[in-house]
Amino acid sequence: MNIFLLGFWILSFLCAVSYIYTRTTLSTITEVGFVQFQRAYLVVYLLAMAGDWLQGPHVYALYESYNMTPHQIEILFVAGFGSSMIIGTVVGSFADRYGRRANCILYGVLYGLACVTKHFNNFWILMVGRFLGGMATSILYSAFESWLVYEHNKRGFDQDLLGNIFSNAILGNSLVAIVAGLVAQFFADQFGFVAPFDLSMAVLIIMIVIIIFSWPENYGDKTSNFKQSFSNALHSIRTDNKVLYLGLIQSLFEGSMYVFVLEWTPALTPKAPVTGAAAKRHLLEDNEGHHGTIPHGHIFAAFMVAVMFGSSVFKVLSKFTSIESFMRPVLFTAALTLLTPILFPGNQAVIFSGFLVFEMCVGIFWPSLGTMRGKYVPEETRATIMNVFRIPLNLLVVVILLQNLQMNTIFLCCVFFLFLAAFFQHLLFQSYEKIKISSPTTDSAVVQLKTALKEEEAGITAAAAAGDSKQKEQVV
């Protein structure tokens, strides 16, 4: 048995044990209606992620089948990241004014149209598809979370349960990724490279229908235009250090994560590892193909199980200490893991072990960041702020794609970014400690939203009472 398959089975066992432990020991949900609410969100979210995962594995192969040159394919992928950075930021921010539910539906429409363009062997039509896909990606990583946080607080659920939803979302997403990869491969083998995109479009249509019939609409600030909303978001970032720290942590960690996707294949490939322009091709491919001499499918599956294990570890850690505290060593550990290909070049066992720990950190990071954003990011500009910080994230990936950097240089950059993220996490922890000392029971963003909702309900009740009183006077 090779080390990659061994790693997969060991992690699968640990993941199963941790899942059973968290389900039997830590699962104490007593909130009325929470389970149904969580299910309503997870079904839609996992369908949205399935639509994304089904497309990933065969994008590069489809372009190759259309006889696109490597340079043309590279331009197409840069266009995707670029549109996510610029146009996607604007479209994703519409959620605060025009509705998060509507924005989630728009995600399905845009990504579905992107799937349609894959049927055409035309560079410019495929470019339109990349633009549509880039915009959809920005919505995926902002509007769904914004809808969830608002509804969670509106219904009065305990703040700690928000982390439970994020953790289960990451667990489910990892399972969806593995299944989607297998299903996409089956359809591609049977019907051609465009078939997984048609399947993705069908999944997205189902998601849209479920949203329409099961999700209520919610908003941020409905009165502000985009310019004002963007200005308000920048004001929150400038005046609230916690929001600034969270955004920087998001950009630095996720940027490193996307770059890691570019480099894990050459780092694990024995003998002359691929770097520079050839390495960029591995990012554009699915990292599950059949290039090189390593079992990409086994490695990808092991990575996904590591992420699942990390989501269970998050539940355990959050029961014993604050997220603001334990994320400091998590980010520091993530930085150390990406030193392995630099310190132990060619040592597959050590590098693979380091990468598994990094993926476990990813599984802890996602629910942690979502929970902290739910606490600190202002509700009225939540989606806008989340998309503002996707600008440096996507810029980082675009710069890497356009450069011809050596693999060690790229990993050193990632290590530096992650150490910076750990530093900003420590600053966030210090701010959290100050808030806890001055006001032990206050989480500003959550309290503001709940207070506003109570005032709105009180206003409606008072108006109704006044109307009844006026009717009685008319009768008398």
Image (spheres, rainbow, N blue to C red):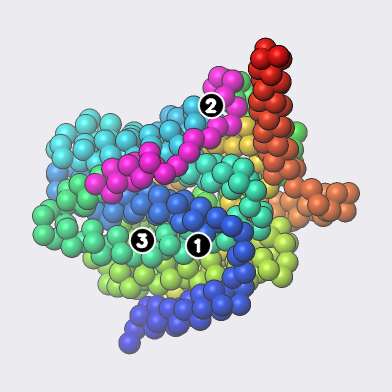
For label 2, count other residues whose C-alpha is less than 10 Å away and answer few (under 14), some (14-19) or many (20+).
Answer: many
Toward which corner of the image does residue 305 lie, by quadrant? bottom left
Asked if residue 318 lies left or right of residue 444, the reply is: left
At x 65%, y 48%, the residue is: 156
Circle 2: residue type: Arg
- Quadrant containing the C terminus is top right
From where the camera sits, is residue 128 visible? yes
How far, Cα to Cα, is label 3 from label 1?
14 Å
Say which label, 2 or 3, has the lower sequence index: 2
| SS at badge 3 | helix
Residue 357, relative to residue 147: is it above or below? below
How far, Cα to Cα, is label 2 from label 3?
32 Å
In magenta segment, residue 90: no
Nearest the eye: 363 or 427: 363
- Quadrant containing the N terminus is bottom left
| Magenta span | 202-226
- Per the image, the residue denoted by label 1 is 168
For label 3, count other residues whose C-alpha is less than 10 Å away and answer few (under 14), some (14-19) or many (20+).
Answer: many
From where the camera sits, is residue 407 visible? no
Circle 1: residue type: Asn
Point out the residue furthest to the left here: 191
Asked if residue 54 lies left or right of residue 258, the reply is: left
| SS at badge 1 | helix
- Per the image, the residue denoted by label 3 is 177
